[in-house]
Image: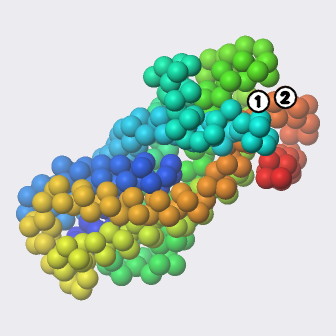
């Protein structure tokens, strides 16, 4: 009935990954649509989707996140290296994205485009599962009516809180990824004595050290989610209305019938388009915050060495974090 249809819409709108820009968002949105279709084919698509077990939602989210991360990783490492450049134009190694990618390929070949990938792909699965599940649960908690009529303010609150929660996994993942992506360059410049494995690096940093830069990660991920989740839901609803899925406009009780007539490939295309639009806007607006986060994480090892003997209280930790953000933003 209408309740099952509304819940199905809520699940589909929540089952997307917002972090990492338009490419990752679009790929995860499309993967989520495919997963939803695979879990509930035929005439009972909406009703069955509402009954998809929690563990399946987690699995679909994690796998789609890992696949999308792998596909776009060469773009991600190019972005990371560009953002980590410091100094004026004369001191910069790379002049732009294409120049950066070509120099990486010439110097290190294809493996160079995947530096920092192992910890990223391993941790991205629980990260995506946590964020998407949190957003799904929070949307349900903040709104019991039809998903397509959920107020934007509620969507923003649910998305922002989900972004806040996911940083538990995001910060260690991003820190290790950026260290892996930049370690060889630092070794070549003499900034570090040797190249370390990820396990050695994690052990050296310790639990506290793995959360270096957590404030800068929150600064990026919470605004990103404020923008991304509501915009994805609204754009997807608009696209479905244009595509003739009237159940998303007025009558939620007819959602199951309309979804029965809508092909799986078309639903995937709509989700991909909505993810691209929402991801492009969210990534573009939060890029300055992403640059700050990248540079804070790039300096994490040196920062931990300087503060290792300092007071370990929470107040001291966050005051040091604020100082790092301030120094990096200058």
Determine whether the residue tagged by mark 1 lies in a helix, strand or loop: helix
Front one among 129 and 25: 25
Residue at horizontal 55 percent and vertical 59 percent from the top: 284
Q: Are marks 1 and 2 in contact (CB under 8 Å)?
A: yes
Residue at horizontal 49 percent and vertical 52 percent from the top: 21
- Rendered location of residue 118, percent (x, y): 50, 26
The residue furthest right is 310
Q: Quadrant of residue 254?
A: bottom left
The residue furthest bottom is 250
- Rendered location of residue 273, percent (x, y): 32, 61
- Rendered location of residue 298, percent (x, y): 71, 35
Q: Measure the alpha-carbon separation of dots 1 and 2.
A: 6 Å
Instruction: Give the number of the disc on residue 157.
Output: none
The reply to whether residue 31 is in sight is yes
Question: What residue does disc 1 label?
Answer: 301
Q: Could you tell me which quadrant the N terminus lies in?
A: bottom left
* Label 1 packing within 10 angstroms: few (<14), some (14-19), many (20+): some
Determine whether the residue tagged by mark 2 lies in a helix, strand or loop: helix
The residue furthest top is 194
With 263 as the anchor, is 270 left or right in this view? Answer: right
Residue at horizontal 64 percent and vertical 51 percent from the top: 290
Question: What residue does disc 2 label?
Answer: 305
Front one among 94 and 268: 94
Give the answer, above or below, for where 259 lies relative to 26: below
Give the answer, above or below, for where 187 lies relative to 87: above
Give the answer, above or below, for where 87 lies relative to 290: above
Q: Quadrant of residue 233?
A: bottom left
- Rendered location of residue 49, percent (x, y): 22, 59
């Amino acid at each position: 009935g209408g309740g099952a249809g509304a819940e199905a819409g809520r699940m589909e709108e929540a089952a997307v990954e917002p972090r990492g820009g338009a490419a990752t968002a679009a790929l995860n949105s499309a993967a989520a649509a495919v997963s939803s279709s695979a879990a509930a084919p035929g005439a009972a698509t909406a009703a069955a989707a509402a009954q998809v077990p929690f563990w399946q939602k987690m699995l679909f989210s994690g796998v789609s996140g890992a696949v999308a991360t792998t596909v776009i990783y060469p773009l991600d490492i190019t972005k990371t290296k560009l953002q980590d450049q410091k100094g004026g134009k004369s001191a910069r190694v790379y002049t732009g994205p294409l120049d950066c990618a070509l120099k990486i390929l010439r110097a290190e070949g294809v493996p160079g485009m995947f530096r920092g990938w192992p910890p990223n792909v391993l941790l991205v699965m629980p990260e995506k599962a946590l964020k998407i599940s949190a957003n799904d649960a929070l949307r349900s908690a903040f709104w019991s009516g039809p998903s397509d009529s959920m107020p934007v303010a509620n969507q923003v609150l649910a998305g922002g809180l989900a972004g806040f929660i996911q940083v538990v996994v995001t910060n260690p993942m991003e820190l290790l990824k950026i260290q892996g992506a930049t370690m060889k360059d630092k070794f070549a410049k003499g900034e570090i004595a040797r190249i370390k494995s990820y396990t050695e690096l994690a052990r050296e940093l310790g639990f506290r050290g793995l959360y270096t830069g957590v404030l800068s990660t929150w600064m990026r991920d919470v605004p990103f989610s404020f923008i991304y989740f509501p915009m994805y839901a609204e754009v997807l609803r608009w696209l479905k209305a244009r595509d003739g899925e009237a159940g998303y406009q007025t009558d939620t009780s007819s959602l199951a019938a309309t979804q029965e007539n809508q092909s799986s490939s078309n639903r995937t295309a709509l989700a991909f388009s909505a993810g691209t639009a929402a991801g492009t806007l969210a990534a573009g607006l939060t890029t300055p915050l992403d640059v700050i986060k990248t540079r804070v994480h790039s300096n994490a090892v040196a920062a931990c060495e300087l503060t290792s003997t300092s007071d370990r209280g929470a107040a001291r930790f966050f005051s040091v974090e604020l100082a790092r953000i301030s120094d990096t933003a200058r």
